[in-house]
Amino acid sequence: MKEGSKHPVFILHRPQMGENIGAAARVMGNFALPELRIVAPRDGWPNETAITMAVGSPVMDAAQVFDSLDEAVADLSVLYATTARPRDMLKPVLTGREAMAETRGHVEAGTRVGVLFGGERAGLPNEAVTRSNAILTLPVEPGFASLNLAMAVGIIAHEWRAADPPPAEFRPLEDPASQDELDRMYRHFEEELERAGFFFPPEKTPLMIQNLRNIFARGGLTIQEVRTFRGAVKALTLGRGKHRVVRGD
Amino acid sequence: MKEGSKHPVFILHRPQMGENIGAAARVMGNFALPELRIVAPRDGWPNETAITMAVGSPVMDAAQVFDSLDEAVADLSVLYATTARPRDMLKPVLTGREAMAETRGHVEAGTRVGVLFGGERAGLPNEAVTRSNAILTLPVEPGFASLNLAMAVGIIAHEWRAADPPPAEFRPLEDPASQDELDRMYRHFEEELERAGFFFPPEKTPLMIQNLRNIFARGGLTIQEVRTFRGAVKALTLGRGKHRVVRGD
């Protein structure tokens, strides 16, 4: 396998606005796609607006600029042409999700993959679509189909990672309560409710208990939350006297 | 089921930049999510920059503005809080893909769902996260995690549709060739190659035929493409004489 081939390369073909180039570099950085190539940007290079919009993305510093599409894709094998309008061309048509799933297989096998994005006004020229293995298009609303260029880049960059789990720092840190801890909490709560005369008529007691327990079972309580809730029940019953019946108060 | 509940509502909480509100309305229009609610936009409402960036999105015209989050979510049942940073809170954590899959189940059952997005600088306040059923976060690069607000809206809007097929107008129109048409094309091509002395040494012929046929089988040819290729073979062989051997020329 070739060095550095574990991700697709994104290629912007003749982009016009620095805003979009910078926003593309930013979102590629968000989703750990390091390789951005830019073919003949309208406003030249470097572009101050692009740098501002990239807000320090490492993808911006590493971006490569080419004069022609031929040069920009010379080392790549599989190409996807993103387009919002159908071309009079016989070519497989994939969604972003499908194309990124396929891309994962390609890069695992060491195949270099490129995703081509056209400029804001004209999109990709037909010759860029012709040389591509497949068309990549998103399931947009037919009556309002025009996606912003950076948005298209971001959506496909996210699809590259969309099956990943949330970042590690989001994983819950605290320990979930055991069934025994939950059982003891339920019994504590229900004993106090019984003492308060809550279960009426008596034949409904099993159903009422079932409904109450379901509230907590759905919540997936932690050990600390069990302690907190038992403390709350205790606080509500303190000083209430042993056999007071609230019903009818 | 309530009227108009077949999609999640997106709520921007105290957004700052009109650019992002407009870009959010645009991309929600792209993915047919009609309901945008905006809580206390910094620069007031209506916002000219937002209107410009929305490029005519019908979502912009229908957007509702509220003074407080309480009012904006009053009629909704299930809420997701999007956040890029972990909160000191025990709450299920879902990716965009997971949350939108869950949302599809909720809206099918008639449950109203809201997705909350915080303003550019501060994100969502803790009280908004507390009232939410789950945290929604994207699998971003930990060292470069800050997503643009409109980009986050767009990525989640796309996830709402990401399992859909490409728009209907992208479906191939022409008829695929039948196996019989392909067989006849293969035999035509191979007969001409045989006459040209291409299959050498003779014992390699079956393998060479297999390799050639695989090129075309992978391509999924249409009837018209079969005709075109047969025409190309015919053109190459016209006037070549019947038994000329090219090998050694």
Image: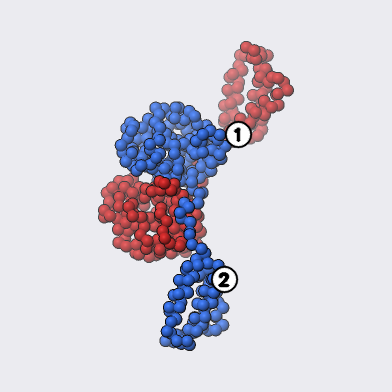
Chain colours: A blue, B red
Up the image or down, B109 lies above or below A156; here it is below
**Residue at image point 44% right, 45% down:** A31
Q: Using the rendered image of the protein, determine whether residue A108 is visible from the camera's viewpoint.
A: yes
Q: Amino acid at mark 1?
A: Arg
Relative to the observer, which residue lies in front, A23 or B210? A23
Image location (x, y in percent) of residue B238: 60, 16
Q: Is residue B212 left or right of residue A55?
A: right
Numbered badge on residue B218: 1
| Chain letter for mark 1 | B
Image location (x, y in percent) of residue A121: 36, 36
Q: Is residue B135 left or right of residue B49?
A: right
- Which residue, as the protein is rendered here, is positioned at the far top? B249
Q: Is residue B103 left or right of residue A41?
A: right
Q: Amino acid at mark 2?
A: Asp
Image location (x, y in percent) of residue B216: 61, 30
**Residue at image point 40% right, 54% down:** B85
- Dot 2 crowding, Cα within 10 Å, few <14, some 14–19, many 20+: few
Which quarter of the image is occupied by the C terminus of chain A? bottom left
- Which residue position is annotated with label 2? A180
| Chain letter for mark 2 | A
Relative to the observer, which residue lies in front, A226 or B193? A226
Tell me the SS state at disc 2: helix
Q: Using the rendered image of the protein, determine whether residue A140 is visible from the camera's viewpoint.
A: no
Tell me the SS state at disc 1: helix
Up the image or down, B126 lies above or below A43; here it is below
- Which residue, as the protein is rendered here, is positioned at the far right? B203
Up the image or down, B210 lies above or below A33; here it is above
CA separation, marks 1 and 2? Answer: 59 Å
- Dot 1 crowding, Cα within 10 Å, few <14, some 14–19, many 20+: few
**Residue at image point 57% right, 26% down:** B228
